[in-house]
Image (cartoon, rainbow, N blue to C red):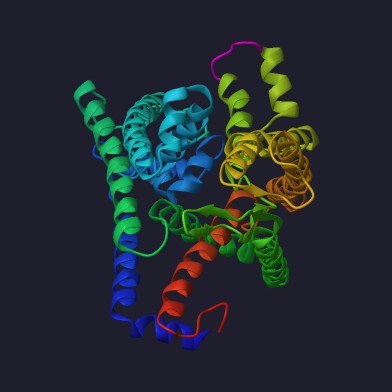
Amino acid sequence: MLRAFANAFKIPDLRGKILFTLGIITIYRFGAYVPTPGVDYGVLQNMLDQGVSGPAQLINLFSGGAFTQLSVFALGIMPYITASIIMQLLTVVVPKVDEWKKEGETGQKKINQWTRYLTVVLALLQSTAVIFMIGAGQLLGVGQLPPGTELIVDDTMPLRLLMILTMTAGTAFIMWLGELITARGIGNGMSLIIFAAIVSAMPGQANIILQNAGEVAFGVTMLVGLVLIVAVVFVELGQRRIPVQYAKRQVGRRTYGGSSTYIPLKVNQSGVIPIIFASSLLFIPSLLTGVVDRPGFTRFIETHLNVELPGFWFITVYFVFTMFFAFFYTAITFNPQDVADNMKKYGGFIPGIRPGRPTAQYLDYVLTRVTTAGSIYLSVLAVLPLIVAAQAGLPFPFGGAVLLITVGVALNTLQQVESQLMQRHYEGFIKG
């Protein structure tokens, strides 16, 4: 492993990409602490001392703490994630977007451009909502501000517009940084930025466990975390390989085909998206309690679907929602009928299965079985931190979206470095 790290820095091209990526991530982390103009940080610190709850927890996770600091990067990469998910869903609803998806690189460039436009629009809407929630004193889920205090120093419309513009520009700048990493660095830029944001919060959570529960609980938590990381790596690399044989074709004097390959169906085909979907939906009832003036509705939400103190029903609904969205998102991203049609078009077939509709039915059958296992795995990871928090009253940094994103991004980046090393006949991280 150490030799592989040394070899990575021996190659000038690879060394430059790694250093460039680290430099961009450093700029991103620095921006997470650049203050937004107009915020009284003395008042903000007093609010943070009371704790963060509600929807702010999810946004803060993906912004690396920038949201609670109300920095220029307060929104983080969440608008881009939302825009990407919307564009993927539009491929099913809008035929034009589906055509772009099938056009290859040219179509992908169009989708990426519209994703950027949508990101800016969503950032503008979200920053507007954040600023007006700041004015109402209900941003961080800690209730109204004490009498005589204001979070915004000079609460005027021009200042609010400046704050909205600043946060929107911050999101656009993060998106640009991510694209720079993708183009000139190592790995997927957006994923690495999310990775950096999540990892930056882990030491603080570990310190809370150490200070509040002692060294024994800290050691047990780290040991459980290590076991979970190994399990997640095992499942994330797991796939069901469906063999595909291509028949020989005679074109003129040349013979094409006759090769064999496979279709890899990952156990976790949908990634972290189901957890994000389920989390976002479960935050909506808590948001509605501040809008709907119904004591019975508020009492029901606080009793059964309380985000701050998740109980049995909240965890159960979260589990079921995650399973549902795992099937839903897999159905959107992998169409067995399209795969079967493409195989038939190029003379491919699954041994023992007739081409066309029987192949699509077989693929659907296998995909359903694999997704069932993957959805249970995702749901367990999603609710694990909630169960630990409910039983021990402590944060659990190894679970849900945190573990999936960090392990997934780390594996992807490691594999890219591995391929660069193997091309130059060096020992890699995995195959050394």
Q: Is residue 292 magenta?
A: yes
Q: Residue at point 48% right, 36% down?
A: 140
Residue 328 percent location from the top left of the image: 66, 33
For residue 8, above or below residue 290 = below
Q: Residue at point 65% right, 64% down?
A: 233
Is residue 358 shown to the viewer in this render? yes
Give the side of residue 280 with respect to residue 146, left or right.
Answer: right
Residue 399 percent location from the top left of the image: 65, 54
**Residue placed most toward the observer, 80 or 34:** 80
Q: Residue at point 56% right, 24% down?
A: 287
Please identify the residue farthest to the bottom as the structure is shown. 3
Is residue 203 shown to the viewer in this render? no
Please identify the residue farthest to the left as the structure is shown. 158
Give the side of residue 96 with respect to residue 288, left or right.
Answer: left
Residue 252 percent location from the top left of the image: 46, 54
* Quarter of the image that includes the C terminus: bottom right
Q: What are the residue bounds of the magenta stretch?
A: 290-294
Give the side of residue 175 with respect to residue 372, left or right.
Answer: left
Occupied quadrant, residue 360 = top right
**Residue placed most toward the observer, 174 or 139:** 174
**Residue placed most toward the observer, 364 or 187:** 364
Q: Main secondary structure of the magenta part?
A: loop
